[in-house]
Amino acid sequence: MKIGNFEDIERIKERGLKKLKPDDRIRVSVGMATCGISVGGDAVFDEFKRVLRGRDDVVLTKTGCIGFCHEEPLVNIYIPKKGILILHRVQPESVKDIVNNLDSVETLDSVFCQIDSWDHLVGGTIEYGSGFEGIPRWNELDFFKPQRKLVMRNAGIINPEDIDEYIAVCGYSALYRALESMTPDEVIEEVKKSGLRGRGGAGFPTGVKWELAKNEQSDVKYVICNADEGDPGAYMNRNEMESDPHSVIEGMIIGGYAIGAHKGIIYIRAEYPLALYRLQKAIDEARSYGLLGKNILGSGFDFDITISKGAGAFVCGEETALIASIEGETGRPRPRPPYPAQKGLWGKPTNINNVETWTNIPLIIKKGGEWFRQFGNEKSPGTKVFSLVGKVENVGLVEVELGTPIRTVVYDIGGGAPKGRKVKAVQTGGPSGGCVPAKFFDLPIDYENLTKVGSIMGSGGMVVMDENTCMVDTARFFLDFSVDESCGKCVPCREGLKQMLTMLEGISSGEGSRSDLDTLSELSETIKTTSLCGLGQTAPNPVLTTLKYFKDEYIEHVDKKRCRAGICEDLVYAPCHNACPLGQDAPSYIAYIAHGKFDKSLEVIMRTNPFPGILGRVCDHPCELHCRAGEGGDPISIRALKRFAADRGEMPHIKIETDRDKRVAIVGSGPAGLSAAYFLRLKGYGVDIFEAEDKPGGMLRIIPDYRLPKDVLDREIRRIEGFGVNIKYGIKVGEDKTIHELFNEGYDALFLGVGFRNGSKLNIPGEEAESVFDGISFLKRVAKGKKLDLGENIYVVGGGNVAIDAARTAWRIAENANVNIVYRRTRREMPAIGEEIEDALFEGINIEFLTNPVRIITENGRVKAVEWVKMKLGEIDESGRPRPIPIEGSEFVTPVDTLIVCVGQTPDLSFTKGAKELNLAGNTVSVDLDTMATSLKGVFAGGDIVTGPSTVVRAAAAGKVTSESIDRYLKGAEVKREFTVEFPHENVPLLKFSAEELKKLSLTGRTESPKIPLNWRRGSFAEVEKTLDVEAAISEAKRCLRCDVKEK
Amino acid sequence: MNAKEVQVFINGKAYRAREGELLIDVARRNGIFIPSLCYEESLEPYGACRMCIVEIRNKGVKKRTATSCTLHVFDGLSVETDSEEVSRHRKVLLELYLAQAPNSSKLKELALRYGVSKTRFKQNTRYNDPLSNSCVLCGLCVRVCSEVMGAGVIGFIGRGEKTRINTPFFEKSDLCLGCKACAEMCPTGAIKFRDEGNIRIANSWSNTYVELKKCKMCGKYFAPSKLDEKIDSIYYYRDKNNELRDLCPDCRRKVITKRINLITENEVERYAK
């Protein structure tokens, strides 16, 4: 049937609406874009087909993708009058259940959200009904809330393989309008007015481009749709074609009419079979309706579209190479000018636009350029679809208005990085783009802003990177892609990129030098300036931006042969080992546990760990954050396994080297001092520790008993003492003895392992009141067994580990009190260990986020109440976290009996008395971070006093590193540290698993340490976590992927 | 050509040119050296070697670089051929070339002209390279073979850094005329031919060989037979005995000279009577 007039369109529209929104039948539509199919959408569809056979009250159709790839396969269930219900993660097994419960579909577990009405824009809002109570509407979900669907106006709702449904949402009415009542010039004027810019990446104004092609005199002209999408991690165009192919076609017809072309070509890569199929089907259907071909809609305008298949070369996205490819030549760019608008395909004027640009056209023609301008910002109107991928919780296609901050896309829509890791950067524009670091996440996304920070808009790929992403490796990856895809015509791109790749490979295998970094940037500049086409001109961007924003990582690779993300294979033994400040050989000790050899396991641990019993309990385990099993699954419980080995294994015999006649004095018996003492003693030095308090342990001693029982602490310290380390109590260095006096007493070297023992103040009125504590002194008092009356309302201010410790301690002491933690940012920014926060919440401690104290109201010298102010997150500061800003007028008062302030700590710097030569940096000692040597000869420092308050494992590591420096110093060698790549050689044999066992293992989740029940915790300081039992430990150890085993 | 005459400024000096002419032509005509590896007047501009970049310094326009072999001149165009930026990039490009084609002495000469004597980059050492690690893929050979000779014997194989120039599938070609235009054009001296008895072997092109034609007079092999078939000359039409075609250039010259001399002798005799 050919459409001849408006009535025909209306008739088809009626028919289409009946299909889209049947009056009397249920409509089940399965998300069947490639993303849906790849996670089993087709199997779900087939199962529906099988189960629904013979049911005429249900229609089954396909639909495209609504964008939420993370939740696929998605199934839309339309129930007349009640609306559309979206089910997520539907598996074929659950189909039967769904079909049996179609009447009460809202009770199913897989219910995700509902669509009561949907604005199809061109077709206006369609009310699908409202009858599902208590189910969130689609645009109430965090993922959809900040989005604005212009391009994806029909995606995931209509059946892309049925032209009637496109017409039902007023498809082709823009074309009708253009042909019926607009001249080509008016069409171009409207597009110009809209301010639409090319969505392929360069952002050239579309209207201007059309005008150029229109003004060329020629009998034959072409319009081309560039569907050669090829950036790694980008799939916007694919989905646009798969979910709404007619909008592309309609846009192209309008474009052809405006320019005066009668032939359109869609250049699409053969790697997109489904998009190809749907486009071809759409073209055929449009042709059969007379929307393509001769005399379209009776206007006398002829236009037809053919598809040209490309073989998938990235460079064919460049317009001159694309034209060469269509002409049957090798896809190599040609010099411009002449521009395609003058001399394009077959030498004729040609206009090329990206898929997404075309899909915007019907919208602009129907609703007007002015209307379009209300979205986005002044210079970049409209929306942009991004494929949000990489290390982000909610992977999917998101469409946001241009000018939306990156933060909204990454955090609000994307949900941040998985497993509580920190997002480091986002890569936009694929291999031609750059990495935008987290400190720029407030940047509104538009063409100019992204260019300003060295990246580009590109076609819309957005790859999120977290701590487990190595920036050198990222640059290497994208460059590898560009080298592969370079056509090889011009030398800077062909040879230059290859040389850059060679250098980057050198750097990531630890063979790079500092001069390589300079050469890299110099070469990048030349390639950018002198390359023939856009591929070469932009290919160095990933390297340039990472070099600019993450130079420290490059330098670490070059100077320290270290890849902090644990990615560069030649530098990394295993990600866990790489992440551990102590360099614990975790794969080997875990493997020994899997073998049942617990003693061997402890032996491996003891090589690099001075107190496994302590660290097995309180370590913040950076190893688990980087564990490869955690990519897509759960990380191994490495800390729990260490504790298991420490508790179960028999202490190995540890050999002490022959005694040397040199002696070392250590100030402070905290983790740094103990660790340095242990390793120095093993090397045969005489070691004396000077401790100001009467008990050893330093900051370890204020860790509450429920986390680290004092007997464990004492046992571990006694073992170190057993090796011949003397601890002298009650001597405060600086006051009782100066550093110089220690040297005079015959010590040959000195290690400062002092902690940050004083709590900081809030500096607000009323802080001097009696029941205001700082976290450290509160914990210290409790540790000493002092009785405290805390009252009923206990508030802890702060978000670090001390705050959590203080809150949980107070919760234990004051059995009837309510305990609250108040933090000025949100959970995402909280620095405390994740599990500790979980435990605190589990114990019933309330955490108030985005709140800060303003003033303390006192009565008779005691706290009576506190006035708080609500905060909001502002711009991102240098730390990469949003700055908290008080909201004016949001002050409120709550009654408070005890206020514990845990907002930071300061050190007692009295040890510097009489040692003016010791250089300080603020309230820390400044050292050479490689060797820990201070400005004073023979004096070294490590731990909190160098870094500020940090973790136990970092302090222990500082002690270990220093012991090596002191060793070199005392042997008379140069203190300078040589960095080499050294891997442990434990080579624990691999366990053999049958296929069945492997399958079972792959399905086994993480085993955590068992915890005592909640009702045993209050009023008691019993240790919360218990040691794993043998069976659990072995089975958990078996899950280890053994990253240490390298393929030979 | 009756194109408009325009004035362009090269390194600050004014020159006359026709509108739309390529800048490199204007410069060379006036004795200004702009290096290039892939440009040749008789071929379509290609823009691959990037050596001929110049800096456009027109007022009011953002300073940018462009290749002079694709830059069509317009009135008032002002360029610098050796600005600081241009030289800097050229040096890096030359280093890249030296790494790609370490065996080319011609390239080394060019590099030295810009003070580049060694490269920081990893040098290409392909074993048994038919182009003896001297090819820079400028494409002159490929283009002259198809655009001028109409033979299309060689082409680009593969893409990116794996691009090679050779005959299809690295097999002997029977289309080659043996004209050596490719070798003649090659800016780096990478292409090798060898004449052995009655055959000419293109060592670089998968040992493609062509037969050579023997001079009927002196017996020397002088030109590829296939190429000779394609050559036409006004002398051949005038040549009633049809013997010139089979003579080498030397013998041909002798014969023609002799004939001219013979005629002259007759005429002398006639005039003498």
Image (tube, coloured by chain):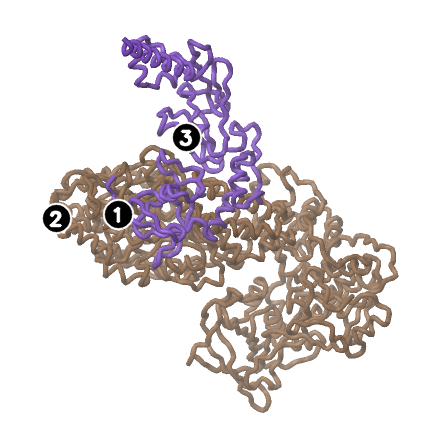
Chain colours: A brown, B purple
- The subunit carrying tag 3 is B
Using the rendered view, name the quadrant where residue A308 is placed.
top left
Q: Position of residue B171 (x, y in %)?
A: 46, 21
Q: Position of residue A301 (x, y in %)?
A: 15, 43
Quadrant of the drawing holding the C terminus of chain A: top right
For the residue pair A927 and B228, the one nearer the viewer reads as: B228
Q: A912 above or below A717?
A: below
Type of the residue with mark 2 = Phe
- The subunit carrying tag 1 is A
Q: A640 above or below B42?
A: below
Q: Position of residue B117 (x, y in %)?
A: 57, 43
Local secondary structure at mark 1: helix
For the point 46% across and 38% down, the residue is B160
Give the number of the mark in front: 2 or 3. 3
Q: Position of residue A549 (x, y in %)?
A: 52, 58
For the point 57% across and 62% down, the residue is A834
Q: Same chain, marks 1 and 2? A: yes
Question: In the rendered image, which residue does mark 3 sit on?
Answer: B142
Question: In the rendered image, which residue does mark 2 sit on?
Answer: A6
Q: Same chain, marks 2 and 3? A: no
Disc 2 residue crowd, few under 14, some 14–19, many 20+, Cα 10 Å = few
Local secondary structure at mark 3: helix
- Please report whichever mark, 1 or 2, sits nearer to the chain's N-terminal start: 2
